[in-house]
Image: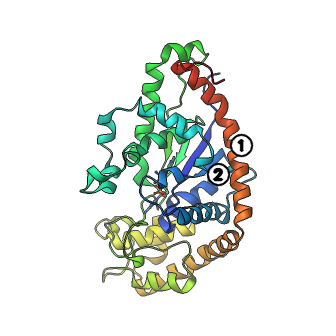
Amino acid sequence: MTKPAPRVFSGVQPTGNLHLGNYLGAISRFVTLQDSYECLYCVVDMHAITVWQEPRELRQSTREVAAAFIAAGIDPKRHIVFNQSQVAAHAELAWIFNCVARLGWLNRMTQFKEKAGKDRENASVGLYAYPNLMAADILAYRATHVPVGEDQKQHLELTRDIAQKFNNDFAEEIAALGYPDGFFPLTEPLISGPATRVMSLRDGTKKMSKSDPSDLSRINLTDDADTIARKIRKAKTDPEPLPTEAKGLETRPEAANLVGIYAALAGADVPAVLNQYGGAQFSIFKQALIDLAVEKLSPITGEMKRLVADPGHIDGILADGADRARALAAPIMADVRKIVGFVGGG
Ligand code: TYM
């Protein structure tokens, strides 16, 4: 019992409007990791309720995210696709981590500050403790690698801090159980590629996000071909043609964003895209981007529609995934209870 085997965990919130940022920054990368890792992909409904969700919409969005995973190419038979609330280990370990993480650590979390806004007193306690639940998601399976977009980096650093403090605080018990290198792994974030931070189509300095009031700011995974084309045509740009080198994008956030999106959709890198389109006007480049985006996204959108039309089928996949996730977490949680000093509970 030394180092845990490589294992990938990642989560997506079912809060409506899955967009191109979620796809390029996370879901498309989940797909590629399937060949090299054992993977768990989770619809994090417990994270979603840290801000108000209509129960009916939460159910719908949960199935929609699961459908997006599968439509994008995740194989729920070879890997595990499930929703968080079906596996009690997440909540149980999150409570223990509430007692490991320090207030000072959580006070530094920029996402809480952004989401709570000015009315901090009125934010839910869950929103504040959100990163502890995220650490529990990952560590309930002793996952070693976590693919995410750039915006989750700080949360993953906190996950490492929690793992480290747990390993230190309980070092004696952990060694006695036969883990000389610590119990929890120091999880590695996997944040790479040309689209780790996809920006708004209306403002290249703002992240593409579910909560932006302007629907033109993002491409949703439910948008049809005409809508995708209209949004890309309306995307903000500058009057210059595309540069021939990546350096020329440094002061042009909107151009950089569209080139990054193209690169990610094409499975290429930014220099390769500029090699092809450097010197081109946006009218030409935008049409190429529209064609590529429609080609790559339409099959996913179509498959998602088909899948959500049969909620019973999706619920079956989530129940099966939850059973397998529970089985993986059970021995880990049994050890956690022993390590902490809880009596009983296997
Ligand atoms: P969420 O639901 O906000 O986003 C899901 C994934 O999409 C990525 N993402 C982006 N990537 C590039 N550009 C963007 N504009 C963009 N917007 C979102 C996010 O980085 C994320 O990878 N806290 C997480 C969910 C979570 C989780 C976890 C992730 C809960 N537990 C455990 C990993 C491991 C979140 O809110 O993601």
Vertical side of 268 occupied by 115: above or below:
above
Crowding at mark 1 (Cα within 10 Å: few <14, some 14-19, many 20+): some
Amino acid of disc 1:
Arg
Q: Is residue 107 left or right of residue 321?
A: left
The image quarter in which residue 61 lies: bottom right
First of labels 2, 1 by sequence position: 2
Q: Position of residue 126 (x, y in %)?
A: 41, 46
Quadrant where the N terminus lies? top right
Q: Which residue lies at the image location 44% right of the left edge and 71% below the top edge?
A: 259
Single out the residue that lies furthest toward the left: 118
Vertical side of 280 occupied by 346: above or below:
above
Residue identified by numbered label 1: 324
Q: Which residue lies at the image location 48% right of the left edge and 23% below the top edge?
A: 167
Q: Which residue lies at the image location 55% right of the left edge and 20% below the top edge?
A: 342
Amino acid of disc 2:
Phe
Q: Which residue lies at the image location 53% right of the left edge and 45% below the top edge?
A: 146
Query: CA gap, disc 2 to disc 1?
Result: 9 Å
Res. 114 visible in picture? yes
Single out the residue that lies furthest toward the front: 55
Residues 265 and 225: in front is 225
Vertical side of 148 occupied by 305: above or below:
below
Q: Position of residue 114 (x, y in %)?
A: 31, 56
Residues at discs 2 and 1 in contact (Cβ within 8 Å): yes
Mark 2 CB lies closer than 8 A to ligand 1: no
Q: Position of residue 16 (x, y in %)?
A: 50, 66
Res. 272 visible in picture? no
Mark number displayed over residue 82: 2
Q: Position of residue 23 (x, y in %)?
A: 54, 64
